[in-house]
Amino acid sequence: EVKLVESGGALVQPGGSLRLSCVASGFDFEEYAMHWVRKVPGKGLEWVAILTWNNNNLAYAASVKGRFTISRDDAENSLFLQMNSLRPDDTASYYCVKDMAGGGSYSFDSWGQGTQVTVSS
Amino acid sequence: KFMLTQPHSVSESPGKTVTISCTGSGGAIAGNFVQWYQQRPGSGPTTVIFESDQRPSGVPDRFSGSIDSSSNSASLTISGLRTEDEADYYCQSQRVFGGGTWVSVL
């Protein structure tokens, strides 16, 4: 059974930083592209970032580019999201999401339960 | 800019059928696969349809997906509605999500 468990969410002041983690199990983590997707309260889902297998390719939504960094540790079956210069509009639940392909098909087949990030003074 | 538009909400009685539309603009929806996700309150999303019309294992065949190129839209149909189907449903293609549709089972 595929399992994705996020952690690291917290209350942080504007301009602050956080590092989200996601531990994966139940599949060959290193063979698949992984994403972060967020849900803003009262709004819909927003794609945030992708990192393909073997760290070959990564991309970011325009709203986070230059502030967020996605990375992975295949030895630890883990995905990370380093978030810097946080803004109130980054407040959301952040989900770790598994792609169906290593190169990134943008077909998502498994989701974590999410970790809450709140940016407020 | 490619966008996906969904109705804000739909409602139907238990046992009935509901269809949720997902209309593309700024590009052809048939150019890429469409996925559908269910999100119940307090839970993470789960995939109910991938690659436009495929069901993951464990998803009942009451859920079906389709594409209509002529209207540039995708649809999710839920038949034999059950109370546990009450949730938000999102369509998605590439990096774009629809705004979500709340399905209410009266």
Image (tube, rainbow, N blue to C red):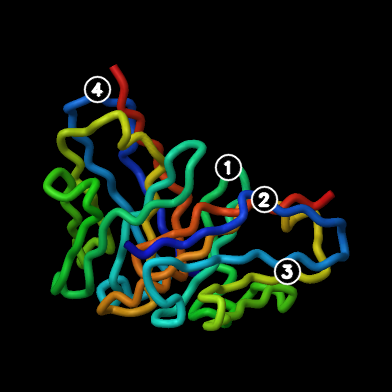
Label 1: which secondary element: loop
Label 4 to label 2: alpha-carbon separation: 35 Å
Choose mark 3 or mark 1, whichever is in front: 3
Label 3 to label 2: alpha-carbon separation: 14 Å
Choose mark 4 or mark 3, whichever is in front: 3
User: Pointer 3: residues within 10 angstroms few (<14), some, or many (20+)?
Assistant: many
Q: Amino acid at mark 3?
A: Ile
Residue B98 pos. (x, y %)? 49, 58
Question: Mark 3 — residue?
Answer: B78
* Figure quadrant of residue A47: bottom left
Question: Mark 2 — residue?
Answer: B9
Residue lying at 43% horizontally and 45% vertically, measured from the top left: A39
Question: Mark 1 — residue?
Answer: B42
In this view, the residue in front, B65 or B56, is B65
Are labels 1 and 4 assigned to the same chain?
Answer: no
Question: Mark 4 — residue?
Answer: A13
